[in-house]
Image (cartoon, rainbow, N blue to C red):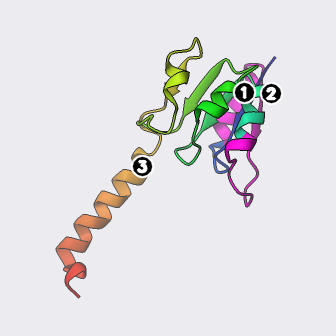
Amino acid sequence: MFRAYITVPDFDPHIVELLNSHDISVTVHPEGMERPGEIELCGLVADYDILIIGVKEKMSKTVFDSVDELKILGTLSVGTDHISDEFFSSSIPVINIAGYNALSVAEFIFGQILSLYKGIWSS
């Protein structure tokens, strides 16, 4: 059984259930707790097979040097500039999850359109 850690507290519970149904034991970072910093990330890449991060987690060379069990690194973003180059030149697949925030982006754009239409920005 693989072990996965998700650093984003509000991760979709349906996806957690799906992963669990495929023999992947999932731990989601507790809501209300500060997101993992470099020291905590070093421990996570040493202990877990799969790590799913957000853009707030900086995967530095120091974190890479702590890799022991990590087999897959996923990021809930299109960009990967928060992930050190060492991860990309290693055998660890780095997967970006494009479209994860598509609804939020659409809501933001719609809000901006309404703001322009109503002239809210000029008040």
Which residue type does callout 1 highlight? Answer: Ser
Question: Can you identify the residue that label 3 sits on?
Answer: 103
How far is disc 1 from disc 3 in space, using C-alphas?
Answer: 35 Å
How far is disc 1 from disc 2 in space, using C-alphas?
Answer: 10 Å
Q: Which sits in the foreground, 113 or 82?
A: 82
Which residue type does callout 3 highlight? Answer: Leu
SS at badge 1 = loop
Residue count near mark 2 (Cα–Cα under 10 Å), binned few <14, some 14–19, many ≥20: some
Q: In which quarter of the image is the N terminus?
A: top right
Mark before the other along the chain sequence, 1 or 3: 1
SS at badge 2 = helix
Question: Can you identify the residue that label 1 sits on?
Answer: 66
Mark before the other along the chain sequence, 1 or 2: 2
The mark lying in front, picked from 1 and 2, is 1
Seen in the picture, residue 21 relative to 38 is either above or below; the reply is above
What's the residue at 52%, 33% (across, down)? 83
How far is disc 2 from disc 3 in space, using C-alphas?
Answer: 33 Å
Q: Answer whether residue 105 is magenta in the image.
A: no
Q: Quadrant of the C terminus?
A: bottom left
Question: Can you identify the residue that label 2 sits on?
Answer: 47
Tell me: 40 left or right of 92. right
Magenta-drawn segment = 13-40
What's the residue at 59%, 16% (across, down)? 92
Do residues under tags 1 and 3 come within 8 Å of each other at their CB atoms?
A: no
Seen in the picture, residue 28 relative to 52 is either above or below; the reply is below
Do residues under tags 2 and 3 come within 8 Å of each other at their CB atoms?
A: no
Seen in the picture, residue 22 relative to 63 is either above or below; the reply is above
